[in-house]
Image (cartoon, rainbow, N blue to C red):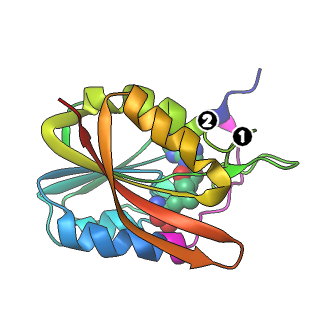
Amino acid sequence: MKSILTSDCMQIYQPREDSYLLEKYVKKLARGKVLDMGTGSGIQARAALEKADNVLAVDINMDAVNNLEGFEKLTAIRSDLFENVKGKFDVIIFNAPYLPSEGEFDPALDGGAKGFEVIERFLTKAKDFLEKDGFMLLVFSSFTDKKKVDQLIKENGFSFELLEKIHISFEDIYCYRLTIAF
Ligand SMILES: C[S@@+](CC[C@H](N)C(=O)[O-])C[C@H]1O[C@@H](n2cnc3c(N)ncnc32)[C@H](O)[C@@H]1O
């Protein structure tokens, strides 16, 4: 079976409304050691640099990783979610691929057949990489099945608050802040 990490010629996701929504909160809240999961163009990683001590940017797309060379305090690596990530972070950011797949799978947009599968895999592992007093910023859409995402967040031991919801054409975009539930 072809590894998801060997697929070539992926487009780098260019910032859209969901990116700008998240960027607003990254600029406000970033601190300490930051992990930008699914960095794409690096918009969140670069916004985090304004306040963070250092940033690790991760993407499954090697072109996105190469695109982020040369920034001070920023390291970029290729990884399928946390596969190649080590250590713990004060802040983890993820503008996830969140759409239900239709036709050919696009890793920048598609979260799996139902839309929430990448988020589910992310949430299953995230606690191991988050400092106890850290938080995560997660973006997804009304196409992702909000009820299911809320349930997955709780099942994986997190609490969440909705920072903002925006409406664009046919969907709502949610920006959540997640903390470890005690
Ligand atoms: C919706 S885009 C967000 C890009 C950017 N962070 C932003 O806010 O504009 C999702 C990104 O996640 C990456 N991605 C998808 N699946 C991934 C995985 N399993 N591991 C790491 N990155 C992944 C995609 O290549 C894409 O760059």
Residue 119 visible within the image: yes
Q: In the rendered image, which quarter is residue 142 located in? A: bottom right
Q: In the rendered image, which quarter is residue 23 located in? A: bottom left
The C terminus lies in quadrant? top left
Q: Main secondary structure of the magenta part?
A: loop
Where's residue 114, x and y in %?
72, 40
Residue 92 visible within the image: no
| x 33%, y 62%: residue | 45
- Circle 1 residue: 114
Density class for disc 2 (Cα within 10 Å; few <14, some 14-19, many ≥20) is: some
Range covered by the magenta-colored residues: 5-18
- Circle 2 residue: 117
In depth, the one of 182 and 77 nearer the eye is: 182
| x 63%, y 47%: residue | 145
SS assignment at label 2: helix
Q: Is residue 8 magenta?
A: yes
Single out the residue that lies furthest toward the front: 147
Q: Is residue 133 left or right of residue 66?
A: left
Residue 34, label in figure: none
The three-letter amino acid code for the residue at tag 2 is Glu
Position of 76 relative to 88 (above/below): below
Where's residue 75, x and y in %?
29, 52
Where's residue 4, x and y in %?
66, 33
| x 42%, y 73%: residue | 21
Q: Is residue 67 magenta?
A: no
Where's residue 59, x and y in %?
49, 48
| x 20%, y 72%: residue | 28
Dot 1 and dot 2 residues touching (CB under 8 Å): yes
Position of 171 relative to 101 (above/below): below
